[in-house]
Image (spheres, helix red, strand yellow):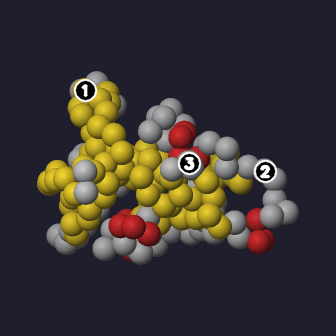
Amino acid sequence: MDRQILHIDPANRSRPLFQIIGWQERVQLPSFGSQPLVAKIDTGASMSCLHAYDFRRRWHDDQMRVSFRTNHPAGWTNSSRRFSARVIDLIAVRSSNGKLERRYVIETQMKLGSNILQGIRLTLSDRSAMQFPLLLGRDAISGFYAVDSGRTFVLESPSRDDFYLT
C-alpha cells in the first residue's frame, strides 16, 4: 500500500505544502487503540518504531501475522493490550546502542494533527529503555511535514494520558 493522506483537514488546505511539526508530537494509531501517545520525530532515522513486546507469530490465509503487547514503556501503568497486525517484512536494524536486531515491519494508519495518513510502516521493538513509545522516522513524514527541531507539540498540546496505548 502506498503512503498517502486519507483525510486533509479543510482548514489546512490554505497552508504551505509542508505542515510544520515539532520534534515531539501527539499521534494516534487508530488500529492500536484510540488513545493518543507522544512520538519523538527523528529525522535521523529512516524507519519508525513502536514499543512492543511478547511477540507471537502465526500464519493466517498465507500471510504472516504478529501479535504483540504494548503499553507505555516508562511503566506509568501496569496495563497492556495485545494487538495483531499483518507482517509486511522482517528486517535487521542496528539500534541506537549499536546492537543488531531483527524486527517485524507492519503497516498502519496514523493521525498526526488533523491529518490521517495510511501506509505508515512501523517496526516493532522493545523500547522500554527509551523515553518515547513511538519514534517517527523520515519515511513516515517525508513529503507531508517539515520538522522544527526547536519546537514541541506544534499541532496539539499534550496531556498525561497521551503516553498510553489503552
Q: In this view, does 24 lie to the left or right of 147?
A: left
Label 2 crowd bin: few (<14), some (14–19), many (20+), radius 10 Å: few
Dot 1 or dot 2, earlier in sequence: 2
Q: Percent from the top left, x then y, of residue 31?
A: 39, 67
- SS of the residue under disc 3: loop
Q: Percent from the top left, x then y, of residue 161?
A: 39, 74
With respect to residue 9, does 19 lie above or below?
above
Q: In this view, does 142 lie to the left or right of 72?
A: right
Q: Percent from the top left, x then y, of residue 17?
A: 78, 50
Identity, as a three-letter code, of the amino acid under mark 3: Asp
- Residue at left offset 26%, top offset 62%: 84
- SS of the residue under disc 1: strand
Can you tell which quarter of the image residue 13 is in? bottom right
* Of 99 and 84, the residue lying toward us: 84
The residue carrying mark 1 is: 100
Q: Is residue 147 left or right of residue 160?
A: right
- Residue at left offset 62%, top offset 64%: 6
Identity, as a three-letter code, of the amino acid under mark 2: Leu
Q: Could you tell me if residue 131 is visible in this image?
A: no
Q: Are marks 1 and 2 in contact (CB under 8 Å)?
A: no
Can you tell which quarter of the image residue 14 is in? bottom right
The residue carrying mark 3 is: 2
The residue carrying mark 2 is: 17
- Residue at left offset 56%, top offset 48%: 2
Q: How far apart are marks 1 and 2 (CA)?
A: 37 Å
Q: Is residue 135 left or right of residue 14?
A: left
